[in-house]
Amino acid sequence: NVIAKPDSDVLQLLLTAYDVMGEQDRALEIAEQLLTVAPEGKRSIAKVLKCSLLFSIGRTEEAEDLYRELISGKMNMLTKNIADVLMKTGRALSLGDYTTAEACFNQSLTRKFPKPTPLSRLSAHYYLAKICYKTNRTDEAESHRKFCIENGGETMMQRQAVNGEIYK
């Protein structure tokens, strides 16, 4: 282990990297570690990230418990905005509510604050491809899949778009 005492910002980046590479088990380990080292002001965002990850891997009951804890606590404006997007989309997808998830992903692509990052845009298009495919809108799904292929870098999302696994 190169990092003797990990910083919460470094762990956030590491968690995101593992998640994007499709290594959710490792990402969850990092999420647990992040919760233990995050200072009080960053603990909410650490919970948001863990909750989003739990929803994405189908651990809905555990994610719901953490979600309830999150919404009952205090969050700054930026964390609240991030939580709204991550929780609404991940939660909606895990519950099969494609209409809500699609609306949130579309909104995340056009919002002014916080401005979408390249990774958040990629993620939105990735999930929009899945949603459009599941709701029998293959032309729209293909448009989002193409975005992932062209802008995905060396991520799990790009690999799945290239080989068609995005639709599974």
Image (cartoon, helix red, strand yellow):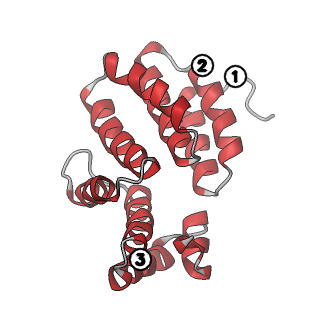
Neighbour class for label 1 at 10 Å: few (<14), some, many (≥20)?
A: few
Mark 3 or mark 2: name the one nearer the start of the chain.
Answer: 2
Q: Are marks 2 and 1 in contact (CB under 8 Å)?
A: yes
- Residue 80, image quadrant: top left
Which percent across, then down, holds residue 54?
55, 39
Vertical placement of residue 31 versus 23, above or below: above
Vertical placement of residue 103 versus 85, above or below: below
Mark 2 or mark 1: name the one nearer the start of the chain.
Answer: 1
Q: Is residue 50 left or right of residue 95?
A: right
Out of 44 and 92, give the one closest to the viewer.
92
Q: CA distance from mark 3 to mark 2?
A: 36 Å
Question: On residue 59, which mark appears?
Answer: none
- Indicate the amino acid at tag 1: Lys
- Residue 86, image quadrant: top left
Mark 3 or mark 1: name the one nearer the start of the chain.
Answer: 1
Outermost residue on the bottom side: it is: 139
Circle 2 SS class: helix
Q: CA distance from mark 3 to mark 1?
A: 38 Å
Question: On residue 37, which mark appears?
Answer: 2
- Indicate the amino acid at tag 2: Val
Q: Is residue 95 left or right of residue 77?
A: right
- Indicate the amino acid at tag 3: Phe
Out of 82 and 127, give the one closest to the viewer.
127
Question: On residue 5, which mark appears?
Answer: 1
Tag in front: 3 or 2: 3
Which percent across, then down, holds residue 52?
48, 40
Q: Residue at x 45, y 68 (%)?
A: 130
Q: Is residue 76 left or right of residue 62?
A: left
Circle 3 SS class: helix
Tag in front: 2 or 1: 2
Which percent across, then down, holds residue 47?
48, 27
- Residue where numbered disc 3 is placed: 147
